[in-house]
Image (spheres, helix red, strand yellow):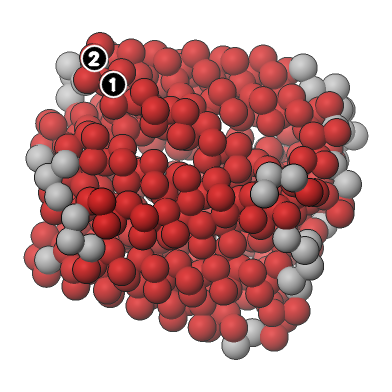
Amino acid sequence: MFGGRLWVPLRSADYRRLWLGQTVSVVGDKVDQIALGILVYELTGSELQMGIMLAVSMLPAAVFGMLAGAYVDRWDRRRTMIVSDLVRAALVFSVPFAVGVGLWLVYAIAFAVATVSLFFEPAKLSLIPELVGSDELLAANSLDSATVSAAELAGLAFAGGLVAGVGYRAAFFFDAVTYVLSALFIWSIAHRAQPRLAIAAGWREVVGEAVAGMRYVVRHPILRDLLAVYSVASAGIAASVTLVYVLALDHFAAGAPGLATLDAAITVGLLLGSFAVGRSNPSGAGRKLLWGLLAYSVLFALTAVAPTLAWAAPILLAVGISNMFFYVPIAAILQSVAVPDMRGRAFAAKQALSRVLSVVGFVSAGAVAERMGLEPTIVAVSILIAVAALVGMSRPRLLAV
């Protein structure tokens, strides 16, 4: 199951260094995510506040996403990732000290971490095509996603015990260390890209480049269809994340172990889905994306009738598998269709457009679940995701890519 073309990108020494850096960083991120979710719920006991906490991490992309993409296309991508890692390490390290000041400061730090990440993710995804061959892009993105899933499982394996045993401070300190290790691995990448634009630029020039990037996406028929579908679906996907928190902490009253169990089930599904997509034929990315999205909607709807945590876990595992069949092809399509000088802005547009609606999904899911109940909210979210998939299937260009 784990053979085939999936491992081919690792023949590139530079891709291996990038891959190793992300592996250690994601382990810490998962510990941090569990600790932050528990921290907010213990302080507030509110489903709405959990949705707000998740929305805070999405909001920067909606506000600053395209500007960050313009800088990514201008700056050295390797250096951008190194600086981003070091800044995030300092911010995460400060979270335990911020709790005593107030929850508002924790939210402010989470907002800052998400803002810095706007530079890291487009830089990483834009760098991958420079480290591997064009016929290895789907495999490289699948391996990247599989690594994230495996590293998240490693983080989940001791996240609950770490937080319960020594407190949330250790979780945030651990995450800070992993960011530093990631920066060291990326620093060791030998590849040096030729400058695309002058590094220095005035504010108006960068804003103009951001606007040009958005125009490029809007005028490109495949990118326009792709991001329109994904943006709408993102609202439902974000809402489903909030509802998983509600399932574990409220509906099943399972606490941190229950949340870790459901999160682990999803992560195992992401891992299996990443391997499956990576071993599949690299053609037909558009069809994979849309069928994966439709499968996600059907499977997530089943959680509305799950009687126990033990029933919900395997359903969410299947949800995780379907997730990878639309998440991985999106990156591969953007990398292959967007011209290199626009690649950073194309990925930034994906982040900005999808996360505007993700903010709506995170917050509205918690609010609607409190008012209408969990089961009707799950069904409504599933219908929204299915509609996005069906609209995409009506776009011949997207089906053909």
How busy is the neighbourhood of tag 1: few (under 14 within 10 Å), some, or many (20 plus)?
few
Most foreground residue, 173 or 152: 152
Badge 2: how crowded within 10 Å, few (<14), some, or many (20+)?
Answer: few
Image coords of residue 255 (percent x, y):
17, 37
The answer to whether 314 appears left or right of 372 in the picture is right
Amino acid carrying mark 2 in the image: Gly
User: What SS does tag 1 mark?
Assistant: helix
- Is 78 situated left or right of 31 in this image? right
Identify residue type, mark 1.
Gly
Residue at the spot of label 1:
161
Badge 2 is on which residue? Answer: 165
Q: From what the image shows, is residue 93 above or below residue 118? A: above
Q: Quadrant of the C terminus?
A: bottom right
Identify the disc placed on residue 332.
none
Q: Which residue is found at the position 17% from the left and 61% from the top? A: 307
Q: Nearer the viewer, residue 253 or 21?
A: 253
Residue at horizontal 69 percent and vertical 86 percent from the top: 396
**235 lies left or right of 169:** right
